[in-house]
């Protein structure tokens, strides 16, 4: 049947036909006692037809309204048959027969064929029994179209309900197919042996297959690295064993991508056993990269904060040193004068006295060294910059430390070119920085089974944003520009993270009392910062330590000098 009319109009017309036929039976009913009730019934049923006329069209495409109509009209037609005076006839049996046929879900055309044949047979029976002749013939003849109209009405409702159900099922399947075929997520089902039962296009194309069929039955292990496959199979067995939903993340080495996986049990509706697992895998590489970038930014921020704190400490110490250095030296001079007097008056044969005086002299010399180191924090001294060949400077430093290295059985691996790599620096101070790092490296390897020092020098292009590197005016190194890097690596005992954070603090040392002042690396940090460079450290306990000294290329020397002069003028200091 072609539905040229809308649902609302068809229901309205069919219900109106039912009312008309029932009205005929009620009006001409042989039972007088129920006529007024029948008239009320007709009026009420017509009113419901008018109500249908005013109900919005969209409501007739909702399941509850259709089921409500079916139940309401089933009751109303039954009441109409009773009020027509045919309650004791076979019309009730015919009516319920039609409802049963409609409820069985037969298609509309087959229902109408069955009802038409039944109406024909029913008409023949009425004719043979003589009901189609005489005064009541019209009433019996109208039973036949009533049967067909009732069949049309309930058949239409049943067909619409079935059609809606199929449409919903088809729409669900269509949405599923759209999700399955066009989703950017990898979707699959898999059996307990880890073999694919289904795979969406995104998944099978990623593995190089042209169709889903080529991938079906393939084990998960054959398409992934052993480590990834073992992880997946472990989670898969968990789902089959417990029936629980599992989520986890993994890294695919072949594709260099991170994935988030969700495994869900598929259960037998009757037994409740898990017979398959549905999986979805989503590419989260970008998210992981952003998380790593965020962590890197956080680390840079923390390092910058610590460096700023360190710089502030250095500046404070410099101001303190310039204020108290002379105050310390004045009493030291008095002590020296007293020692000179004692030395002059102590007899030559007084060995104990002589040793005591020597110890005092050594202590005073040590104090003087410390004072000189502290005074270096004060920026009142000239800071002459020049073009320095870093490779040549390193060779000179190695000559100075050669004896110390051989004495401690330290082997040296040099990894820098014979060609010149030039930087803008104060040569003497840069030598002091490198010497300090080398001596610390030798001391850290005192008990190491392998004593090896590696020195690398190179010139690189800045590519990453980090501490003092970026695009800001305050950054020492701009992205895209050159920097000179000196890397000094030892095989010593290394340091933990807490010690690594403190090694540039003034007076912090891990050496025994009397073997270090704790000012060497602080001075190194100050000197390199003054050259508009950075000094960093990487270390792990038992794995040695690496120092990275990053310097400006010689081409930037004017920039370093200008900044140096500006800072002195700002502080009112003589250059």
Image (cartoon, rainbow, N blue to C red):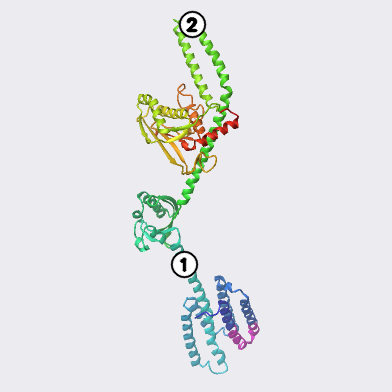
Judge whether 249 appears above or below 115 on screen. Answer: above
Q: Secondary structure at mark 2?
A: loop
Q: What is the quadrant of the C terminus in the image?
A: top right
Residue 332 visible in the displayed image: yes
Q: Is residue 230 above or below residue 211?
A: above
Residues 72 and 442: in front is: 442
- Residue 333: numbered disc: none
The answer to whether residue 275 of the structure is visible from this angle is no
The quadrant in which residue 397 appears is top left
- The residue depicted at 56 percent of the width and 16 percent of the height is 331
Label ID, residue 346: 2
Pinpoint residue 275: horizontal percent, then vertical percent.
39, 59
Picture layout, residue 6 above or below residue 504: below
For mark 1, what is the residue?
174
**Of callouts 2 and 1, which one flags the residue occurring earlier in the amino acid sequence?**
1
- Whether residue 23 is in magenta: the answer is yes
Q: Position of residue 189 (x, y in %)?
A: 40, 59
Task: Name the residue nearer the viewer: 32 or 343.
Answer: 343
Residue 92 included in the magenta stretch of the image: no
Tell whether 224 sits left or right of 150.
left
Q: CA distance from mark 2 to mark 1?
A: 110 Å
Q: Main secondary structure of the magenta part?
A: helix
In x, y percent, where is residue 55?
61, 74
In this figure, what is the number of numbered marks? Answer: 2
x, y percent for residue 560:
52, 35
Q: At x 34% / y 62%, what residue is drawn? A: 214
Name the side, left or right, on which 185 lies relative to 334.
left
Question: For the magenta stretch, what is the residue range?
Answer: 19-39
Q: Nearer the viewer, residue 521 or 574?
A: 574
């Amino acid at each position: 049947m072609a539905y040229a009319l809308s649902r609302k109009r068809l229901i309205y017309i069919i219900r109106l036909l039912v009312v008309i036929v029932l009205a005929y039976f009620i009006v001409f009913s042989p039972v007088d006692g129920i006529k007024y009730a029948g008239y009320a019934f007709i009026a009420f049923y017509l009113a419901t037809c008018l109500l249908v006329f005013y109900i919005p069209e969209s409501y007739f495409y909702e399941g509850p309204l259709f089921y409500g109509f079916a139940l309401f009209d089933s009751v109303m037609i039954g009441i109409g048959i009773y009020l027509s005076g045919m309650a004791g006839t076979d019309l009730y049996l015919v009516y319920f027969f039609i409802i049963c046929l409609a409820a069985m879900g037969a298609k509309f055309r087959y229902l109408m064929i069955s009802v038409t044949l039944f109406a024909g047979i029913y008409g023949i029976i009425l004719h043979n029994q003589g009901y189609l002749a005489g005064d009541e013939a019209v009433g019996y003849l109208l039973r036949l179209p009533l049967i067909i109209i009732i069949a049309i009405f309930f058949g239409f409702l049943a067909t619409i309900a079935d059609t809606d159900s199929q449409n919903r099922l088809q729409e669900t399947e269509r949405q599923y197919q759209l999700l399955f075929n066009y989703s950017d997520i990898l979707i699959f089902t898999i059996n307990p042996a880890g073999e694919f039962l289904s795979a969406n296009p995104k998944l099978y194309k990623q593995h190089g297959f042209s169709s889903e069929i080529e991938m079906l039955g393939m084990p998960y292990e054959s398409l992934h690295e052993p480590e990834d496959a073992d992880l997946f199979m472990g989670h898969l067995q968990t789902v089959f064993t417990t029936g629980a939903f599992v989520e986890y993340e993994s890294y695919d080495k072949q594709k260099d991508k991170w994935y988030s996986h969700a495994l869900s049990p598929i259960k037998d509706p009757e037994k409740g056993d898990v017979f398959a697992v549905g999986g979805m895998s989503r590419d989260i590489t970008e998210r992981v990269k952003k998380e790593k970038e965020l962590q890197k930014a956080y680390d840079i921020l923390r390092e910058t904060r610590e460096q700023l704190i360190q710089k502030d400490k250095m500046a404070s110490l410099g101001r303190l040193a310039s204020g108290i250095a002379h105050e310390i030296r004045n009493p030291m001079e008095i002590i020296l004068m007293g020692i000179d007097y004692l030395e002059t008056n102590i007899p030559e044969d007084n060995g104990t006295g002589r040793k005591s005086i020597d110890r005092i002299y050594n202590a005073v010399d040590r104090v003087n060294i410390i004072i000189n180191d502290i005074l270096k924090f004060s920026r009142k001294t000239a800071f002459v910059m020049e073009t320095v060949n870093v490779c040549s400077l390193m060779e000179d430093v190695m000559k100075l430390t050669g004896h110390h290295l051989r004495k401690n059985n330290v082997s040296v691996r040099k990894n820098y070119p014979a060609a010149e790599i030039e930087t803008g620096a104060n040569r003497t101070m840069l030598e002091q920085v490198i010497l300090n790092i080398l001596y610390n490296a030798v001391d850290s390897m005192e008990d190491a089974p392998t004593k090896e020092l590696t020195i690398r020098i190179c010139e690189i292009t800045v590519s990453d944003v980090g501490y003092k590197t970026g695009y800001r005016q305050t950054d020492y190194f701009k992205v895209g520009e050159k920097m000179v890097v000196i890397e000094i690596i030892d095989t010593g005992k290394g340091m933990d993270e807490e010690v690594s954070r403190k090694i540039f603090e003034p007076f912090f040392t891990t050496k025994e009392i009397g073997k270090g002042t704790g000012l060497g690396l602080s001075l190194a940090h100050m000197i390199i910062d003054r050259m508009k460079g950075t000094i960093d450290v990487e270390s792990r306990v038992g794995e040695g330590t690496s120092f990275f000294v990053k310097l400006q290329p010689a081409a930037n020397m004017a920039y370093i000098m200008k900044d140096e002069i500006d800072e002195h003028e700002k502080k009112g200091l003589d250059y």
